[in-house]
Amino acid sequence: MKNNPLVSVIVPVYNVEDYIEECLESIINQKYQHLEIIIVEDGSTDQSRQKIQNYLSDDRIIFIEQKNKGLSGARNTGMSKATGKYILFVDSDDYIDVRLLADAVPLMEEKRLDLIRFNGMAFTDGMEKTINQKYYDFSHRLVENHIYKEDSFKANSRTFVSPVYLYLTRRSVLTENNLFFREDIIHEDELFTPQVFVHIKTMMYLNKFYYYRRYRENSIMTIQTPEQLKRSFDSYVKIGKELESYYQESLYNKEQKKLIKRQIVSIYNGIKETKMIERNSSKLFKSISFIDKGYLKLRKLWQKVK
């Protein structure tokens, strides 16, 4: 490929001393080498910083240290420093296939794509957990090598999963629409991803497993203390309400609004299923209709039958 556009790989780091080396090795050894690797050390209290030092001789690495701001804050710092044409997020306890960017970037260039989606492979580390691999595999509903345009809204609605590490994005989509991660919540991808999806104009899907997602003890996703459950609940309420504000705006077309509404319904259903729900939860989101509630009841009955 004559033109090798720069790719910004953003890696937020917090207390991952056992995993950071595997993560960085998978990025540094990409077959596609025109990278800037932005490592944001987010106030770790373990040996993560020391292990990163061994990689700083690579002049593609931009190392940033900051007081702990959380995953959203670390990603935002990385985005503010990024100069690449494309952005890839990699969580520091995960790793990627060395062919990911070599396969994806030429397609982004040739087809003038805003976004490429790909599959992930989940695995457990030091914990007993059954993982639904279909959550990270989109081959049952997305067509490989098809260039999605207006039909991307419907496709992404039908195959919606929130993790931002499952797609490569044109940076201008983020900068031109002022997209950043909200910093006062967890589950921030549940808000950020639909914002990205409604603003893209072209997309493709690669039916390959490029991302390796680690489930481990004491991560944000596995801690189930009362305090963490309350924080999770409050975050989902904020996400739902912000999505609802987008849904009510006139600048989105019908298909874009369907994608946003799909996510509001999903958030509402998740909140409704928690034990922390309040009696007046039915009035939590004004956009939730009787039809939406009926659909959720029917889906729940169908799942029991299955």
Image (cartoon, rainbow, N blue to C red):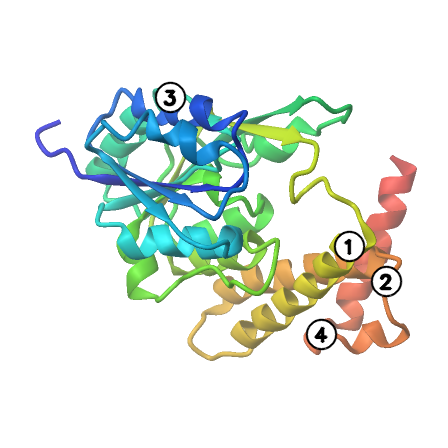
As measured in the structure, the alpha-carbon distance from the residue carrying label 4 to the one carrying label 3 is 44 Å
Residue drawn at 46 percent across, 55 percent down: 67
Residue drawn at 89 percent across, 48 percent down: 301
Q: Where is residue 284 shown, x and y percent of the image?
A: 75, 75
Disc nearer the start of the sequence (4/1): 1
As measured in the structure, the alpha-carbon distance from the residue carrying label 4 to the one carrying label 2 is 16 Å
Name the quarter where the C terminus is drawn: top right
Residue 258, above or below 250: above
Q: Residues within 10 Å of mark 1 (few under 14, many from 20)?
A: some
Q: Are marks 2 and 1 in contact (CB under 8 Å)?
A: yes
Q: Where is residue 90 shown, x and y percent of the image?
A: 44, 37
Residue of label 1: 229
Q: Nearer the viewer, mark 4 or mark 3?
A: 3
Residue of label 4: 285
Residue of label 3: 25
Disc nearer the start of the sequence (4/2): 2
* Tag 3 secondary structure: helix
User: As rendered, which of 279 and 255 lies closer to the eye?
Assistant: 279
Disc nearer the start of the sequence (4/3): 3
Residue of label 2: 276
Determine if residue 251 is in view.
yes
Q: Residue type at mark 3: give it.
A: Glu
Disc nearer the start of the sequence (3/1): 3
Q: Nearer the viewer, mark 2 or mark 3?
A: 3
